[in-house]
Amino acid sequence: MTELPSRQHALETLAASSADKPFDVLVVGGGITGAGIALDASARGLSVGLVERGDFASGTSSKSSKLIHGGLRYLEQREFGLMREACTERDLLRRLAPHLVEPIPMALPVSDRKRRVQFGVGLWAYDALASFKNMRLHRHISGPETEELVPALPPGKIRGGFLFYDAITDDVRLVMENLIASVERGAVVCNYAEVCDLIGGKDICSASVSDTLTGDTIDVYARRVVVAAGVWADKLEQQARVSAEPRLRPSKGIHLLFRKDALPITETAAFVPDVARRRMLFVLPWLDAVLVGTTDTTYEGSLDHPTVDEEDRNYVLDSLNGVFDLGLTPEDIAGAYAGLRPLIQGKAGSTADLSRKHSVYEIAQGIIGITGGKMTTYRRMAIDATDRIAAELGNHERSKTKWIRLGASEPDAIKPEIAARAQALGLSPEIARNLVRCYGDRARDVLDIAEHEDARDPVAPGYIPISAEAIYVARHEMAAHLSDFLARRARLAITDRNAGIGEGSRAVEMMASVHGWSRGERNRQQDAHQAEVERERGLAVAPPAAPKRGWRRAADAVLRRERTG
């Protein structure tokens, strides 16, 4: 079963390229756009290398609203073509990755007749632009039914509402599935590999790439380079050109996550209007928490370290309390994150008014860039970029990604198999479902680890991810740091107030068992993870407690097995 090779093997393969034996395509950027391009290009028979300066999906692609959606709010901007494209891509992704892209009902409560008419007209247009092929057509719901679907709403204040459907996902897992599928087709991908210099050329381009974990530098050669670096694209363009005008206008979006007992949202999400600020907020049941977002404000700070500041936090809390009247405070927040959207420069004004369309453009001879867009339409973005490259290289294959399954070859068949195996190991049905959602067919491999390496316990008590997952991603998904697992693969950094390192956590011990971390390195990894989470949240993480001795012995036993082969 395909998985990512070791980083060392990937770096050696990248370094083996030369002016005489170049890759066809070097992709710079390991977010959803870069991953989609790597898959599209490798599926057409092109040789592909991909490098990412941080962890895969560590930028915007792990900071989305977790929705694969048709873009209902784009109606206001009259982005009808983008909306139709998004609806088409959403439904295709549900077919390609049904374990990972799942339909979710969304209630839209209304409190007055005027807004009922506005939203009703908008939802009919939404269904029409999807050629009336949405998962289900929207319908009007009464006040009592709206309150039943969204228990957090105050009783008696809602006149009614609408119910429509979109899809929800785990953005990081979607990136990983695209990367793994590209590796299955011959691509070479590597994280913590930063492009320090980029030189274009008619026939050969080259990139100086630094292994940020060791400081070593290699040269990678390719016939064409695609810069898919999101909000960092302008910086890379400046490397390749003497002067380059900024193309992007970053926009910050923040999300808060709440404990489910603090914000009672069950199976139906809510799409609630914040009338005072003329925005809409998503309120989604997601993993072990309830996710709320998003803001859309011009951003001029550090691209590497956007944060949820007090103003952001108060805005979302005030908006929620205005709708639900729950008296929510920062103490109810389980996690928070801030992401930067790479919006293309437009006329002066709010970033909320800028288009979410993407752009493919020339940076230098042999080097193209792609930016803008949104997660839902990443596959179309990848097709546009690869079409341009393939034409220049004389490859006349058409995109095949419309037929490539992502992560589960037979999703309906694997679910009962994993459920039965999990039950035999004493694991809950929720854990079984989460393993299929995260790993698809590779859930079998995670259960093998759980069974044979004493790794069945939760990574963090009270949460779904199990210890075997930490071992698996460290071995097979290039998870090099504790945050690679807790912040991205398991998402505990945003769903758990203790960020996955509270009392009873096994994460650092399990990853240490694979990477051979000393006690000092384990402490450093834990401290670095806590600092990263606190910087982004703008809130403190409770100090971690030492793991229980029995768990430590189990982790040390795994470490001994790793060392002895």
Image (spheres, grey):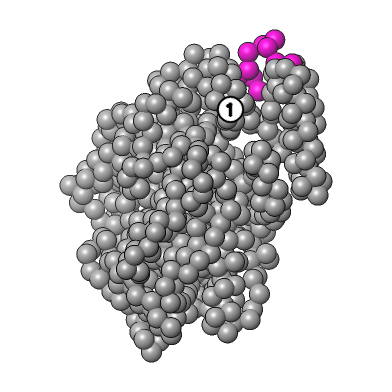
Q: Amino acid at mark 1?
A: Arg
Residue at left offset 48%, top offset 26%: 316
Helix, strand or loop at label 1? It is loop
Residue 469 vertical placement versus 1 (above, below): above
- Residue 78: x %, y % from top left: 68, 44
Q: Nearer the viewer, residue 394 or 189?
A: 394
Is residue 249 visible to the viewer in this orientation of the structure? yes
Q: How many marks?
A: 1
Position of 304 compared to 64: left or right? Answer: left
- Residue 452: x %, y % from top left: 43, 54
Q: Nearer the viewer, residue 310 or 176?
A: 310
Reading the image, the residue beneath label 1 is 278
Residue at left offset 50%, top offset 58%: 371
Toward the left, the furthest residue is 520
The quadrant of the image that shows the C terminus is bottom left
Residue at left offset 59%, top offset 43%: 67
Q: Does the segment drawn in magenta span residue 174?
A: no
Q: Which residues are magenta?
A: 148-159
- Residue 198: x %, y % from top left: 34, 71
Residue at left offset 55%, top offset 36%: 286
Residue 457 vertical placement versus 214 (above, below): above
Position of 135 compared to 398: left or right? Answer: right
Q: Nearer the viewer, residue 361 or 271?
A: 361
Is residue 222 visible to the viewer in this orientation of the structure? no
Main SS of residues in magenta? loop
Q: For residue 195, what is the image quadrant?
A: bottom left
